[in-house]
Image (cartoon, grey):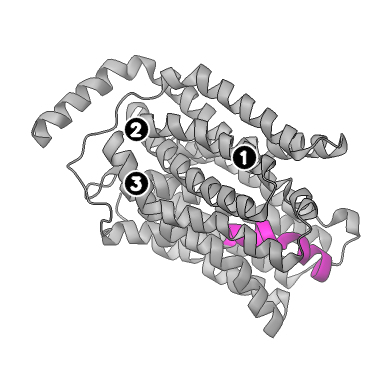
Amino acid sequence: MTSSISTSVYMQIVLDNSDHKRGFRIATSIFFFIAGLTYSSWACRIHELKIHFSLNNAELGSILFALPIGLMISLPVSGWMVTRFGSRKVLILAGLGFPLMLCVIGFTTQIWQLVIALFLFGFLNNVFEIAMNTQAVGIEILYKRSIMASFHGLWSLAGFTGIALGTLAIALNCPVRFHFSVIAVLCWLLVTLSWKYLLPSDEPQDAQPLFARPDRNILKLGLIAFASLITEGTMFDWSGVYFQKIVQVPAALTTVGYIAFMGTMAAGRFAGDHLVTRFGIKRVLQCSGIISTSGLLLAVAIPHIYTATFGFLLVGIGVSSVVPLALALAGRSKTMPSGMAIAAVSTVGFLGFLIGPPLIGFIAEATNLRWSFAMIAILGLGTTLLASRIKH
């Protein structure tokens, strides 16, 4: 079958399914919720696993590194899998496998078992992410407008849900293995109820090698994601420390900045699609970088609880839609299959998420934490500078 015939067949599939687009959107949204719920459930029980295995901070850090290694190794593989087998099949398998690995983590009894489980957890996490974002790009084609940010908003909402359930489980002294098993069963139930309504077909592409060189536009989108994710990584890992050491709030208020950031990031994702429709994707990306940079610089310049909290609110707004929009643009690439283009942007972007937190530590050790945050603020401005150079 030639490429032109395949494309025409795909367009017929799109037309035939246009009346079912709401069902496709709901089903894919459920999978975004599953991904966020599974990951946040793991994150909120790390401390219990540290105690269970009698690990010190250095040992825990070494073991946790298995997760990003698995994620990084899966980046080229996941793009190839989605291109070869289609996002629907890959997403269904990942939707079953990712919660399964969460369950396995809860039942590990040896450190080597935990390392392997975390490696596979990271691997499947990224397979899940690439497949569901590819589905989301296909659904955007049906809607003919931006809807990607709202999908990621559901991921954030699921994160809040997972943290709330995890906090309840901890308060009830619920064993980790039981907690993770309940989450896995809930996720499998959601997969069972929704898999039939996923978008049945991706746009066909010619056969691609396992490794494909991204074009300049894809690299720019990756750098935009890098600039945003280096800021996100900083907020996830260092916002509490900043409020404790620099803002010097009481112990009970150290999470205020993090909560402010997470709240506006989730809300911003639900509002992001409307803003793109009204102002255009390039304008939203440009403003996002300015807003996140301004928020961090405010927290650095005036480290008071009110100004720092407001600054972190701005950071959440600024980074909320950047990665979803970068992935959406990658999914529309004319030079690479959607899955591989999304994987390429994720690869470059995730490096920012990995590099940001340790970079903060190194600079803080050499100077102080305020200088670290100021440097991240300047890097975050890269979103604005690069957005003016992208093609869409």
The span shown in magenta is: 231-247
Which residue is drawn at the image coordinates 48% and 50% (left, top)?
Answer: 323
Q: CB atoms at circles 2 and 1 under 8 Å apart? A: no
Amino acid type assigned to the residue bearing label 2 in the image = Gly
The mark closer to the camera, 2 or 1, is 1
- What number is the disc on residue 104? 1
Whole-percent x, y for residue 355 in the image:
55, 67
- Which residue bears the numbered disc 3? 79
Q: Which of the two labelled residues, at mark 2 and mark 1, occupies the earlier sequence position? A: 1
Which residue is drawn at the image coordinates 33% and 39% (left, top)?
Answer: 82
Residue 370, above or below 309: below
- Which residue bears the numbered disc 2? 138
User: What secondary structure is marked by label 1?
Assistant: helix
The mark closer to the camera, 1 or 3, is 1
Q: CA distance from mark 2 to mark 1?
A: 32 Å
Q: Which of the two labelled residues, at mark 1 and mark 3, occupies the earlier sequence position? A: 3
Local crowd size for mark 1, using a 10 Å CA cut-off: few (<14), some (14–19), many (≥20): some
Q: CB atoms at circles 1 and 3 under 8 Å apart? A: no
The mark closer to the camera, 2 or 3, is 3
Whole-percent x, y for residue 143 in the image:
37, 27
Report the quarter where the N terminus lies: top left
Local crowd size for mark 3, using a 10 Å CA cut-off: few (<14), some (14–19), many (≥20): many
Q: Is residue 226 visible?
A: yes
Residue 209, above or below 367: above
